């Protein structure tokens, strides 16, 4: 069976044969289900607090026993999904005349700290294409999103040129 890619190690999926090993996770949040096939997609499994182990994995709040248990700590969080900024979102975040610290995705040590000089809208085949001018370069919003990341002042993390998509 192919597991969800967020599961770091299949040995941490406990069943009725290894309940003794799972006792150390009592009180923790766990993915619990009666269908092992659901571990193909963690989004299809509810998270419960493991309250006790006795004839299965028990959640007191639901008053239910489950056959399979995976402590949440043995899964990776779901990656956030992003989309490119719209022009309005971009101008709400960045101000003309102010510097932007950015770099090509993953190019540590090759950061640029350049002034946002402005923007230009052009019509191509009845579609508006917007160019963002940072320093001497012109970039489309799609190009900034796909190829670059930026750093907010007073933080160390770089972020995509885009907005998180709500699921």
Image (cartoon, grey):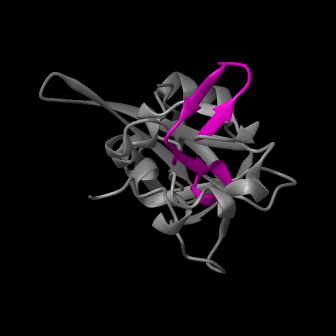
139 part of magenta stretch: no
Give the residue furthest to the front. 55
Q: Nearer the viewer, residue 35 or 65?
A: 65
Give the residue furthest to the top. 62
Query: What stretch of residues is rendered in magenta?
Result: 56-79
Give the residue furthest to the bottom. 109
* Left or right, 153 with reference to 83: right
Image position of 118 with respect to 14: above or below: above
Spot occupied by residue 34 in the image (x, y as percentages of width and height): 43, 35
Spot occupied by residue 24 in the image (x, y as percentages of width and height): 78, 58
Residue for point 61% across, 33% down = 47
73 part of magenta stretch: yes
Give the residue furthest to the left. 125
Spot occupied by residue 21 in the image (x, y as percentages of width and height): 67, 64
Residue for point 60% across, 29% down = 91
Quarter that holds the N terminus: bottom left
Image position of 7 with respect to 141: above or below: below
Q: Nearer the viewer, residue 142 or 21?
A: 21
Image position of 64 with respect to 111: above or below: above
Whether residue 21 is visible here, answered yes or no, is yes
């Amino acid at each position: 069976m192919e597991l969800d890619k967020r599961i770091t190690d299949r040995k941490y999926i406990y069943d009725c044969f290894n309940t003794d090993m799972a006792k150390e996770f009592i009180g923790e949040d766990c993915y619990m289900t009666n269908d092992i096939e659901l571990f193909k997609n963690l989004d299809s499994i509810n998270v419960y607090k493991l309250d006790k182990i006795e004839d299965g994995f028990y959640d007191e709040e639901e008053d239910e026993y489950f056959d399979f248990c995976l402590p949440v700590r043995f899964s990776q969080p779901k990656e956030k999904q992003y989309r490119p900024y719209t022009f309005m979102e971009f101008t709400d975040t960045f101000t003309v005349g102010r510097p932007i610290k950015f770099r090509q995705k993953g190019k540590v040590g090759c950061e640029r700290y350049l002034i946002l000089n402005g923007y230009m809208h052009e019509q191509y085949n009845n579609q508006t294409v917007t160019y963002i001018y940072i320093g001497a370069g012109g970039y489309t919003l799609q190009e900034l999103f796909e190829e670059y990341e930026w750093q907010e002042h007073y933080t160390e993390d770089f972020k995509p040129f885009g907005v998180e998509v709500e699921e």
